[in-house]
Amino acid sequence: MNVRKKLENLNIEKRAYINGEFVEAENRKTIEKISSIDGLIISGIAACDDVDVNKAVEFAKKSFYSGSWSMLPPSEKKIILLKLADLMEKNREELALLDTYETGRSYQNYFYDSIPKAIEVVRYFAEAVDKYYDKAIPPRGSEFGVIIRVPLGVVGAITPWNDPLVVAAWKFAPALLMGNSIVMKPAEQSSLSILKVAALTREAGIPSGVFNVVTGYGEVAGKALALHKDVRGIFFTGSSTTGKRILEYSGQSNMKKVALECGGKGPYIVTNNCSNLAEAAKVLADNMFYNQGQICSAPSRVIIDKSKFNDFIKYLKLECERYVPGDPYDTDNNVGCVVSPEQYHKIQKYIQQAKDEGAEVYQAQNKKLHSEKACCIQPTIISNISIMSKVVVEEIFGPVVVVLPVEGVDEALSIANSSDYGLAGAVWTDDLDEAYYVARNIETGLVHINSYGNDDNSAPFGGVKESGLGKDKSLYSFDEYSDLKTIWFHSRNYQR
C-alpha cells in the first residue's frame, strides 16, 4: 500500500507555536527546501528569528512564574502528559506521514518504530515522575536538612532531523514534568511533527506559554535561543561542531546549563572468540542501515579480528540486501531516502574518496529507486583502507560502514578509542571476561555486549569526549532539567 495520497487530506500547520497559539514569523519569512523523495519544493514553514524567540521566551517565563504549570503536583502533570501520549497515539498515522514527507525516511519505519517509541518515552517519564524523590539529611541535634530538585525555569531544546519526535520527547517530557516551561527549536529539515504535537499539548491541557515551538534556521533561531539570558538551560542534539558553539553561547550569555548529545563513530568490536558471526552481521546491519545510516549512535566502524574478517564480510554483504532503499511512502518498504540533496552529495563524496584511496567498496546491487530525483544510497561496506582516512575518522551520517581488521583485543581497543567521539559501542565475544574487559575500557557512554541498540528508556543515553555531555532517557534526565537546592533547618526552641 502507498500512503502518499493521504498527505493531500492533511491540514499541515507550518507556523510557530507561541503562548498557546499558532503565529506567523514576525518577518513573514518562510523556509524553502527540496524534497529528497521526489525533488519537489517543500515551503511555508515559518523562518523565525530573534524577535520570535524573544516573544516565546517572554511568554514561557511568564507562564513559569505564574505557577500555572510549575506549581502543579507531579500527579497532575502525570495525568496531562499521559493524555498527551494518548493523543499522539491517536494521531500516529499523521505524525508518521509528516516526518516521512519532510525527511524522506520510510513511513513504515516511522509508523511502526519511531512514533511508537516517542509515545513510549512520554509515558515512561509521566509514570516515573511521582516516584522520583528528594533526599533528607538525618537530624543532628536541633538541625537537619533536605536536598530538593527545583526546575530551572525557561529551558530551550534544539532537536535534530534524523529521529524528530523521539529525541524531542526525550527532552520535553522530563523538562515539563520537572516544572519547566520550554521553547523547542526543531531542525529546519523536520519541523512539522513537533508542531502537530504542540497542538496536541493544548488539547491535553498544558497551559498557554508552557510549551512553545519556534521554527527556523539553526544559525538564526537556534543561536538566539542559546544566547538568550532568560533561558536557564539549553539541551541540544546534533553535530559536535554546533554543540561546541552552544557551549560558547552559554558562556557569552548567562552560563546557562548545557547538555549536548552530539556525533558518533560507533566502534563495533568482533573478537576472535565470537562464534556467531552471522548474528553479529545481522545486528550490525539492523542498526547501521535502517535509516540510511543517519543515526548518531550508528555502529559505523567494525573493528574485527583478522581471523574472522573474511567470513564476517560475506555475512554482512548478504544483510545489506535487506536494506536497499525504495519509495518511503510504500508501506512494504523499510528504507527510504537520506534527508536532503545536500546530505546525499556529502555521503557520495565520502564514498568516492574511499574509492580514490584504493579501498574496496561494496554496495548492495538490488535497486528499487522510485524516482530519478530520489536521494537514496545503497548500503555500503568499505574495507582495505587506512585508519587515518577521513572515511574512518569522520562521522559520515550515511549508510556507510568501514571494516578494519586487527590482531587482538588491545589493538581493537586502541583503534576504537582513537576517535574524537565516544557515544555508543559494542563487543561481540563468547568470553565473559573478555567482554567485561572491553566494556570497561572502551571510551563510550554506552556499550553493548553481543547486541546493539536494544536498551530501553530506563537506560541513560549520552556520550563522552566530542559526543557530548549530559544524558537523555532514564531517571537521570530529571537531574538535567533541574537544580539541586539544599534547605537547612535549625530549631532555636530545641530543648534536650
Image (cartoon, rainbow, N blue to C red):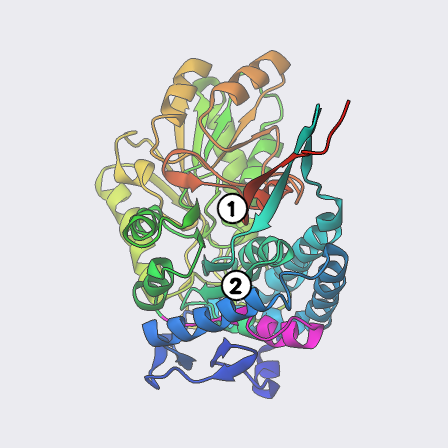
Q: Quadrant of residue 96?
A: bottom right
Q: Nearer the viewer, residue 454 or 468?
A: 468
On screen, 157 above or below 36? above
Q: Position of residue 271 (x, y in %)?
A: 51, 19
Q: Which residue is mark 1?
A: 320
Which of the image's four quarters has the C terminus? Answer: top right
User: Magenta segment: does it hold 355?
Assistant: no
The x, y position of residue 325, in whole percent, is: 50, 59
The residue located at (72%, 48%) in the rendering is 128
Instruction: State which region is magenta.
Output: 196-216
Q: What is the quadrant of residue 216 in the picture?
A: bottom left
Circle 1 SS class: helix
Q: Is residue 293 visible?
A: yes
Number of other residues with Cα within 10 Å of mark 1, as a class: few under 14, some 14 to 19, many 20 or more: many
The amino acid sitting under disc 1 is Cys
Q: Which residue is located at x 36 percent, y 58 percent?
A: 226
Q: Amino acid at mark 2?
A: Ile
Q: Residue at x 51, y 70 (%)?
A: 62
Q: Which mark is residue 182?
A: 2
Distance from Cα at disc 1 to Cα at disc 2: 41 Å
